[in-house]
Image: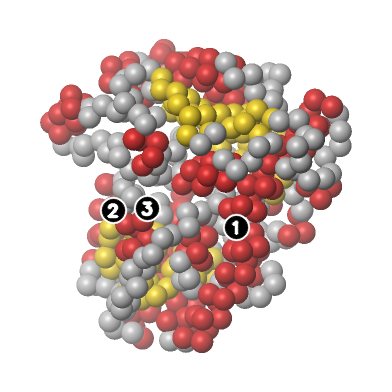
Amino acid sequence: MNILSSELKKLKIVWLCHFSNEEIRRNLPLSKKRLENIIRKLAGKKPLKANFDFAPWISILAKEFEQFDAVEIHVVAPFRGLKRLTAEFEIRNIHYHLFKPCEDFLLLKYVHKIPFLKKRKHTINRLLIKKLVKGQKPDLVNLFGAENPFFAVGALDFKSIPIYVSLQTVYADPLFKDLMPDYSEERKKYEIKIFQHSKYFGCSGLKHKDLVLSYNPDAYFFKFMFPVQQPKAVFDGHKTIDFVYFGSITPHKGIEELVNALYIVKQHKEDTKLQIIGKCESSYLQKLRDHISKLDLTENIQLFDYFPLQQDLFEQIMKSRIAVFPLKLDIIPSAIREAISLNLPIVTTRTSGTPFLNRDDEAVLLSDIDDVAGLANNMLKLSLNSELREKLVINAMRVYRREFDSTIIAKGLLGDYYSVYNHYYRNVPIPKESLFNENEFPEY
């Protein structure tokens, strides 16, 4: 079936998500949040940043779906810093309905700390989402990120519309409790409710499928990969740094194991360099700095904060020769796909998704989770072997073009929408070839 055929019913789809990009911000009436930043300064906290990019996959998908006549996309999303309660506009056939979340009201931040009101802290968001979504009368709601309750809970209010959940991080993973410093049982509780309420899921690994099935044995699963930003021309000067990690800086990303691995690498290559780039809680950042100092790696490791603009991040990344991701929980994180698109050879760990990258040919070097010696050995091996680096880059790019190309992903998602629509409203069986194939992801 040609999913772009003019004979198909034109679907109206709502994307329930959270994102930001420069073009969206130009269309919004944004507050400078002067009062709140004064209060934060007095409390010794950093000022709030409103002008930064995040969740680029939404922007990438929107650009792709602009080309499809078979579907009408309505993006419903919270946006901190709005001067008004809602802002609605259209950009190149994509309709945006953004709202000011209750977390953005200064008074409510404190009111919701009161025990008997804490349980109702998402009420305003749910009401706004319900109003904005029902006003469109969609055929389907696609939720991106069930682990973010401040907007994801809105999906619970739709009883007669199919919900397709694109799984990002599955917070219900039992390992989260030990590895996340800010772990919240409340977030897990809401995520499980969404799993039980929804019927259709897009995932990129068997582990996530099995976790959702443990709460909802009647769920249907499609293969869905998040697209990544295609970098523009980036830094092409002399690469002076051996390794780079970029992404969230938390224990579940294996950052301490990476530092320990670099300590081993340094025994063989005294002048080895690593840059670690990403958002990090101040308490964990200090712990990390102390650990780096204890291992006498202060001169070998540079720590960078989150870059507000993704292009600036790419330019900093490209000063390095090799990307390293010592993962513990991720399937195939966007950072790995971005590293591939930047033609960086990759060292990572064996999760429920990363072996997929080596299905046809070796595209990344893998070691077991928490195997510091194995990680260090792969880092050292790759840094000393230019032919291996070139081979991995070529093989990884083949995987990228086949699996992570944004147009291919968008067309696949559009096909999923029609499969869900026909199954939910017309009781048409979902084609077997459209469903998640466990044989592609046999390990975890």
Q: Quadrant of residue 171?
A: top right
Task: Name the residue that disc number 1 marks.
Answer: 404
Q: Are marks 1 and 3 in contact (CB under 8 Å)?
A: no
Task: Name the residue that disc number 3 marks.
Answer: 310
Q: Are marks 2 and 1 in contact (CB under 8 Å)?
A: no
Label 3: state its secondary structure: helix
**Between tags 2 and 1, which lies in front?**
1
Check the image and report above or below for 236 versus 1. Answer: below
Q: Residue at x 61, y 52 (%)?
A: 407
Task: Name the residue that disc number 2 marks.
Answer: 305
Q: Position of residue 396 (x, y in %)?
A: 58, 70
Q: Position of residue 33 (x, y in %)?
A: 23, 27
Q: Residue at x 31, y 78 (%)?
A: 238
Mark-to-mark CA distance, 1 and 3: 18 Å
Q: Amino acid at mark 2?
A: Asp
**Between tags 3 and 2, which lies in front?**
3
Label 2: state its secondary structure: loop
Q: Amino acid at mark 3?
A: Gln
Quadrant position of the C terminus in the picture: bottom right
Q: Position of residue 218 (x, y in %)?
A: 78, 34
Q: Is residue 256 visible?
A: no
Q: Residue furthest front?
A: 6
